[in-house]
């Protein structure tokens, strides 16, 4: 028997309402913050991620789904959302748009060849926002507030925001040199990945999941000591903005994020709910000065984040927050014979065109079984159609909750349902 690929999941009809609820929340919040949806291809030129995400990252080195197409081009299923958005910004010359920053969001599947863990899949759905074209601490604060508002709006309470400043490129260079001097003498004690990172991106040693408890990681130089005055001033304004919005945060000087393009503000939102799992990250993002130029674009700057819908659902489960069940059918039509089934088909089509949720029995079951089916589907009203109802052009409509019964003309059925809503 052919089975689902490892690291993926079927989202069944009984569970899809949870996804619809989350996605609607995200779209409404995006609209409130004036972010417009962008849709980029499911696959891109592999070089976009090698250059944009960074050759030293786990994403590029270990996790990408890459293949050669029939034109002998190297293509990669997108593992993250920022690089494709930036590519689109450059290619479509959005720097000339009158509205700056350009503020967009996306909800799209992502693909990473990771070891399957609770709440983590090889195909997952990510929501993200990007604000490109303006370097202003208040934009950083706004982007962070989008994520925090979303989690709070769905009822999560056991969450914590961690922030850090990675500084500008000059600050990063000095800090990387200090990290090399700190780790190099004992780098043989670290995992193979960190031994490679010491020469490519030493900051990522601080982000290592294997060696995070190593004493040298704990005693590593503090990045704040290497920030120049401009970087410190920028970070202070970000902190001030968060305080003005009453968004609590904690500074984590080891927070560097896993991608090469971050500068200045970096942040993560963690779940602290009991039972959530070992990997507590819900959301991560930061500012990326220089990324557009790395991709042959203009000298522009941006900031964004990505969050997994799967992990948001997992956090809701860990905190015991129930997602509202969708309403059932407006009407269920029970039928007694072939002529009634033909009439029901006509009524169904007319009512559905007016956006009523209606259905009937297609198994030609007894009336009692049809009534049970109506209850299972959460129908608000039921009617029974037989020979008498067709001849008189009227039916008895029953409220399934109150058991109240009223008589209504068939051509007035839509108006009755509308008034009852």
Image (cartoon, grey):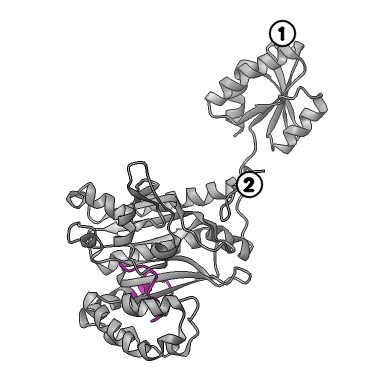
**Is 415 positioned to the left or the right of 293 in the image?**
right
> Which secondary structure lies at badge 1?
helix
The residue that appears at 29% across and 61% down in the rendered structure is 51
Image quadrant containing the N terminus: top right
- Camera-side mark, 1 or 2: 2
> Which secondary structure lies at badge 2?
loop
The residue that appears at 64% across and 18% down in the rendered structure is 345
Q: Which mark is residue 391?
A: 1
Q: How many angstroms separate mark 1 from mark 2 (CA)?
A: 52 Å
Image quadrant containing the C terminus: top right
Q: Which mark is residue 296?
A: none
**What secondary structure prevails in the magenta region?**
loop
Q: Which mark is residue 3?
A: 2
- Quarter where residue 334 is shown: top right
The residue carrying pointer 2 sits among few (fewer than 14), some (14 to 19) or many (20 or more) residues within 10 Å by Cα, namely few
Q: Position of residue 363 (x, y in %)?
A: 74, 25
Q: Position of residue 304 (x, y in %)?
A: 34, 61
Q: Which residues are magenta?
A: 239-261
Indicate whether 5 appears above or below 198. Answer: above
């Amino acid at each position: 028997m052919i089975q689902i690929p490892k690291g993926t999941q079927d989202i069944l009809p009984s569970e899809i309402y949870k996804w619809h609820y989350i996605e609607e929340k995200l779209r409404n919040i995006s609209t409130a913050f004036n972010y417009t949806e962008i849709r980029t291809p499911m696959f891109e030129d592999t070089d976009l991620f090698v250059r944009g995400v960074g050759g030293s990252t786990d994403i590029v080195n270990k996790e990408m789904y890459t293949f050669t197409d029939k034109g002998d081009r190297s293509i990669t299923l997108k593992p993250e959302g920022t690089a494709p958005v930036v590519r689109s910004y450059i290619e479509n010359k959005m720097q000339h748009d009158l509205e700056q920053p350009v503020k967009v969001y996306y909800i799209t599947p992502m693909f990473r060849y990771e070891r399957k863990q609770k709440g983590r899949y090889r195909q997952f759905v990510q929501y993200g926002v990007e604000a490109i074209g303006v370097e202003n601490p208040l934009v950083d604060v706004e982007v962070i507030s989008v994520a925090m508002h979303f989690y709070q709006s769905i009822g999560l309470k056991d969450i914590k925001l961690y922030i850090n400043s990675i500084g500008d490129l000059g600050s990063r260079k000095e800090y990387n040199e200090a990290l090399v001097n700190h780790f190099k003498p004992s780098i043989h004690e670290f995992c193979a990945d960190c031994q490679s990172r010491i020469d490519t991106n030493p900051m990522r040693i601080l982000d290592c999941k294997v060696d995070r408890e190593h004493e040298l990681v704990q005693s590593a130089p503090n990045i704040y000591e290497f920030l120049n005055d401009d970087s410190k001033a920028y970070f202070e304004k970000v902190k001030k903005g968060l305080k003005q919005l009453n968004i609590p945060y904690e500074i984590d000087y080891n927070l560097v994020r896993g991608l090469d393009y971050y500068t200045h503000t970096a942040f993560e939102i963690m779940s602290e709910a009991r039972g959530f799992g070992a990997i507590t990250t819900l959301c991560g993002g930061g500012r990326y000065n220089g990324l557009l130029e790395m991709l042959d674009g203009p000298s522009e700057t941006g900031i964004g984040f990505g969050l997994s819908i799967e992990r948001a659902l997992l956090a809701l489960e860990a905190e015991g927050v129930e997602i509202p069940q969708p309403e059932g059918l407006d009407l269920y039509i029970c039928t007694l014979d072939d002529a009634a089934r033909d009439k029901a088909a006509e009524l169904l089509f007319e009512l559905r065109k007016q956006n009523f949720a209606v259905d009937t029995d297609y198994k030609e079951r007894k009336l009692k079984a049809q009534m049970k089916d109506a209850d299972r589907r959460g129908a608000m009203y039921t009617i029974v159609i037989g020979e008498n109802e067709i001849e008189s052009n009227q039916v008895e409509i029953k409220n399934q909750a109150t058991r109240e019964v009223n008589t209504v003309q068939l051509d007035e059925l839509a108006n009755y349902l509308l008034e009852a809503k």
